[in-house]
């Protein structure tokens, strides 16, 4: 029970890591301070963790990093969208 609680707690924190940046990007429509390299690496990293979680059957890893990967993709799209609209 405690192991699952730790796993799901980590999943929630991992999945919400990019949320403050996404909210800021949407509110301000300014993404110049967001590193495309960081967003790309974050998204690839979480995608790899999803793959790993699937391979070992670890639901908390799959859920957390699946959501985190979606957040990374969202920030990537925002970066492209708002960077082009500012130029």
Image (tube, rainbow, N blue to C red):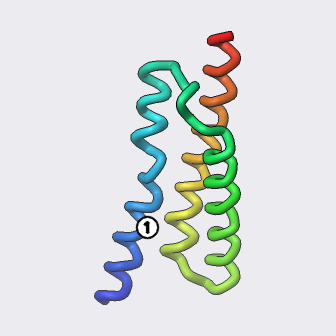
User: In the figure, 30 relative to 14: above or below?
Assistant: above
User: In the figure, 15 relative to 49: above or below?
Assistant: above
Name the residue located 69 percent from the left edge and 67 percent from the top edge: 48
Q: Where does residue 15 sit, x and y in percent of width and height?
A: 46, 57
Q: Circle 1 sits on which residue? A: 11
Name the residue located 55 percent from the left edge and 26 percent from the top edge: 31
Element carrying mark 1: helix
Toward which corner of the image does residue 10 lie, by quadrant? Answer: bottom left
Q: Where does residue 52 sit, x and y in percent of width and height?
A: 67, 77
User: In the figure, 21 relative to 71: above or below?
Assistant: above
Toward which corner of the image does residue 44 lie, by quadrant? Answer: bottom right
Q: Where does residue 81 sit, x and y in percent of width and height?
A: 66, 23
Name the residue located 68 percent from the left edge and 45 percent from the top edge: 37
- Local packing at callout 1 (Cα closer than 10 Å; few below 14, some 14-19, many 20+) is many
Name the residue located 59 percent from the left edge and 49 percent from the top edge: 70
Pick whichever, 27 or 31, lies toward us: 31
């Amino acid at each position: 029970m405690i192991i699952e609680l730790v796993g799901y707690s980590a999943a929630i924190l991992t999945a919400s890591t990019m949320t403050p940046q996404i909210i800021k990007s949407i509110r301000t429509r300014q993404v110049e301070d967001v590193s495309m390299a960081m967003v790309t690496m974050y998204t690839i990293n979480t995608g790899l963790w999803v793959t790993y979680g699937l391979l070992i059957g670890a639901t908390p890893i799959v859920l957390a990093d699946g959501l985190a990967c979606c957040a990374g993709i969202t920030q990537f799209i925002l970066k492209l969208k708002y960077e082009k609209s500012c130029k």
